[in-house]
Amino acid sequence: MAEAKLTIEEIEKIQQLLEKGYTAKELAKKYGVDRSTIYRQVKYRYSAKRMPLEVKNKIIKKIKEGYTKAEAAQMYNVPLSTVLWFTKGLPSIRHEGTHIIRKHGIELLRRLLRDGCLVSNFVPATVRNLQRHFPMIRSARFKNRTIFYLEGREEETIEAFFRENPSRVINYSSIEELAFLLGVKISKKEQKNLLEKYRKKRETYLRSIRLIQLTLNHFCDEEDIEWAKPSFRLMPRRKNFEVIGEGK
């Protein structure tokens, strides 16, 4: 069964009645439509098919002035999908997408200001959104890992990378490679300090991995192990086999 639709005049009348105190349930019964229709069509006044040409031109004008399609849709209380539908061939000057910094993004921004970088425990897409608002946030790709850091805090980023990734091999070449990628120079003395500081941490990490991988044979001899007896009975092997179809 097709859903009943409201005309523009009826929508305007319903908006006035809602302001006077009528409920959506009462108005849905009065106009013979579902309650969800009242909510949807009153909230978004225009659809793609019955939107006045004047409103379309205003939205297109706003997009050409530099507003995003999402912002233009919000200005005229029109669904974003409707605006995207009739402005397919119209490029947006500004980048489309979410421009809101949410709670998780604020927490990552605080970490950036405190530590100077983000090496682990973050969502890259959230930090990419922060980069749109804060161009001083830089990014780099090293050893199959994305790093975000603040401009001017590259040395802290190098130290944090090896501190938070003990599984990585740390040597002079890896330090120089990361420093070259971030555009800074590290003296031999600083490289030596990093090696002495985090090489022991890597050895501790590898030792813990070896302990996890140890089997029972490393702790006791095989002769001392009492193997459990099988709970099933093995059938004795028959010496003489009979082939089906042949005589005895």
Image (tube, rainbow, N blue to C red):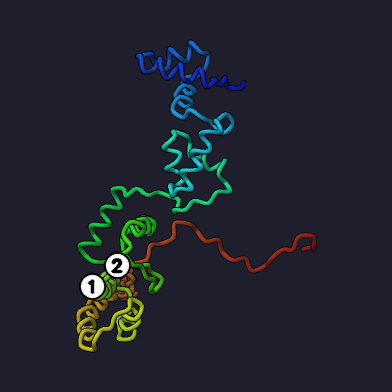
Q: Residue at x 48, y 12 (%)?
A: 29
- The circle drawn on residue 156 is 1
| Relative horizontal placement of residue 133, taking residue 195 as reference (left or right) | right
Residue 238 drawn above or below residue 7: below
Residue 66, can we see it?
A: yes
Quadrant of the rendering where the N terminus is positioned: top right
Figure quadrant of residue 168 = bottom left
70 or 208, nearer to the observer: 70
Residue 219, can we see it?
A: no
How crowded pointer 1 is (Cα within 10 Å; few <14, some 14-19, many 20+) is rated as some
Q: Amino acid at mark 2?
A: Tyr
Residue 6, x across and y down, in percent: 54, 20
Residue picked out by circle 2: 149
Badges 1 and 2: C-beta atoms under 8 Å apart? yes
Residue 184, x across and y down, in percent: 29, 80
SS of the residue under disc 1: helix
Residue 226, x across and y down, in percent: 34, 67
| Relative horizontal placement of residue 247, taking residue 112 as reference (left or right) | right
Q: Residue at x 51, y 34 (%)?
A: 55
166 or 11, nearer to the observer: 11
138 or 248, nearer to the observer: 138
* Spatial CA span between label 1 and label 2: 9 Å
- The circle drawn on residue 58 is none
SS of the residue under disc 2: strand
Q: Number of labelled discs? A: 2
Q: Amino acid at mark 1?
A: Glu
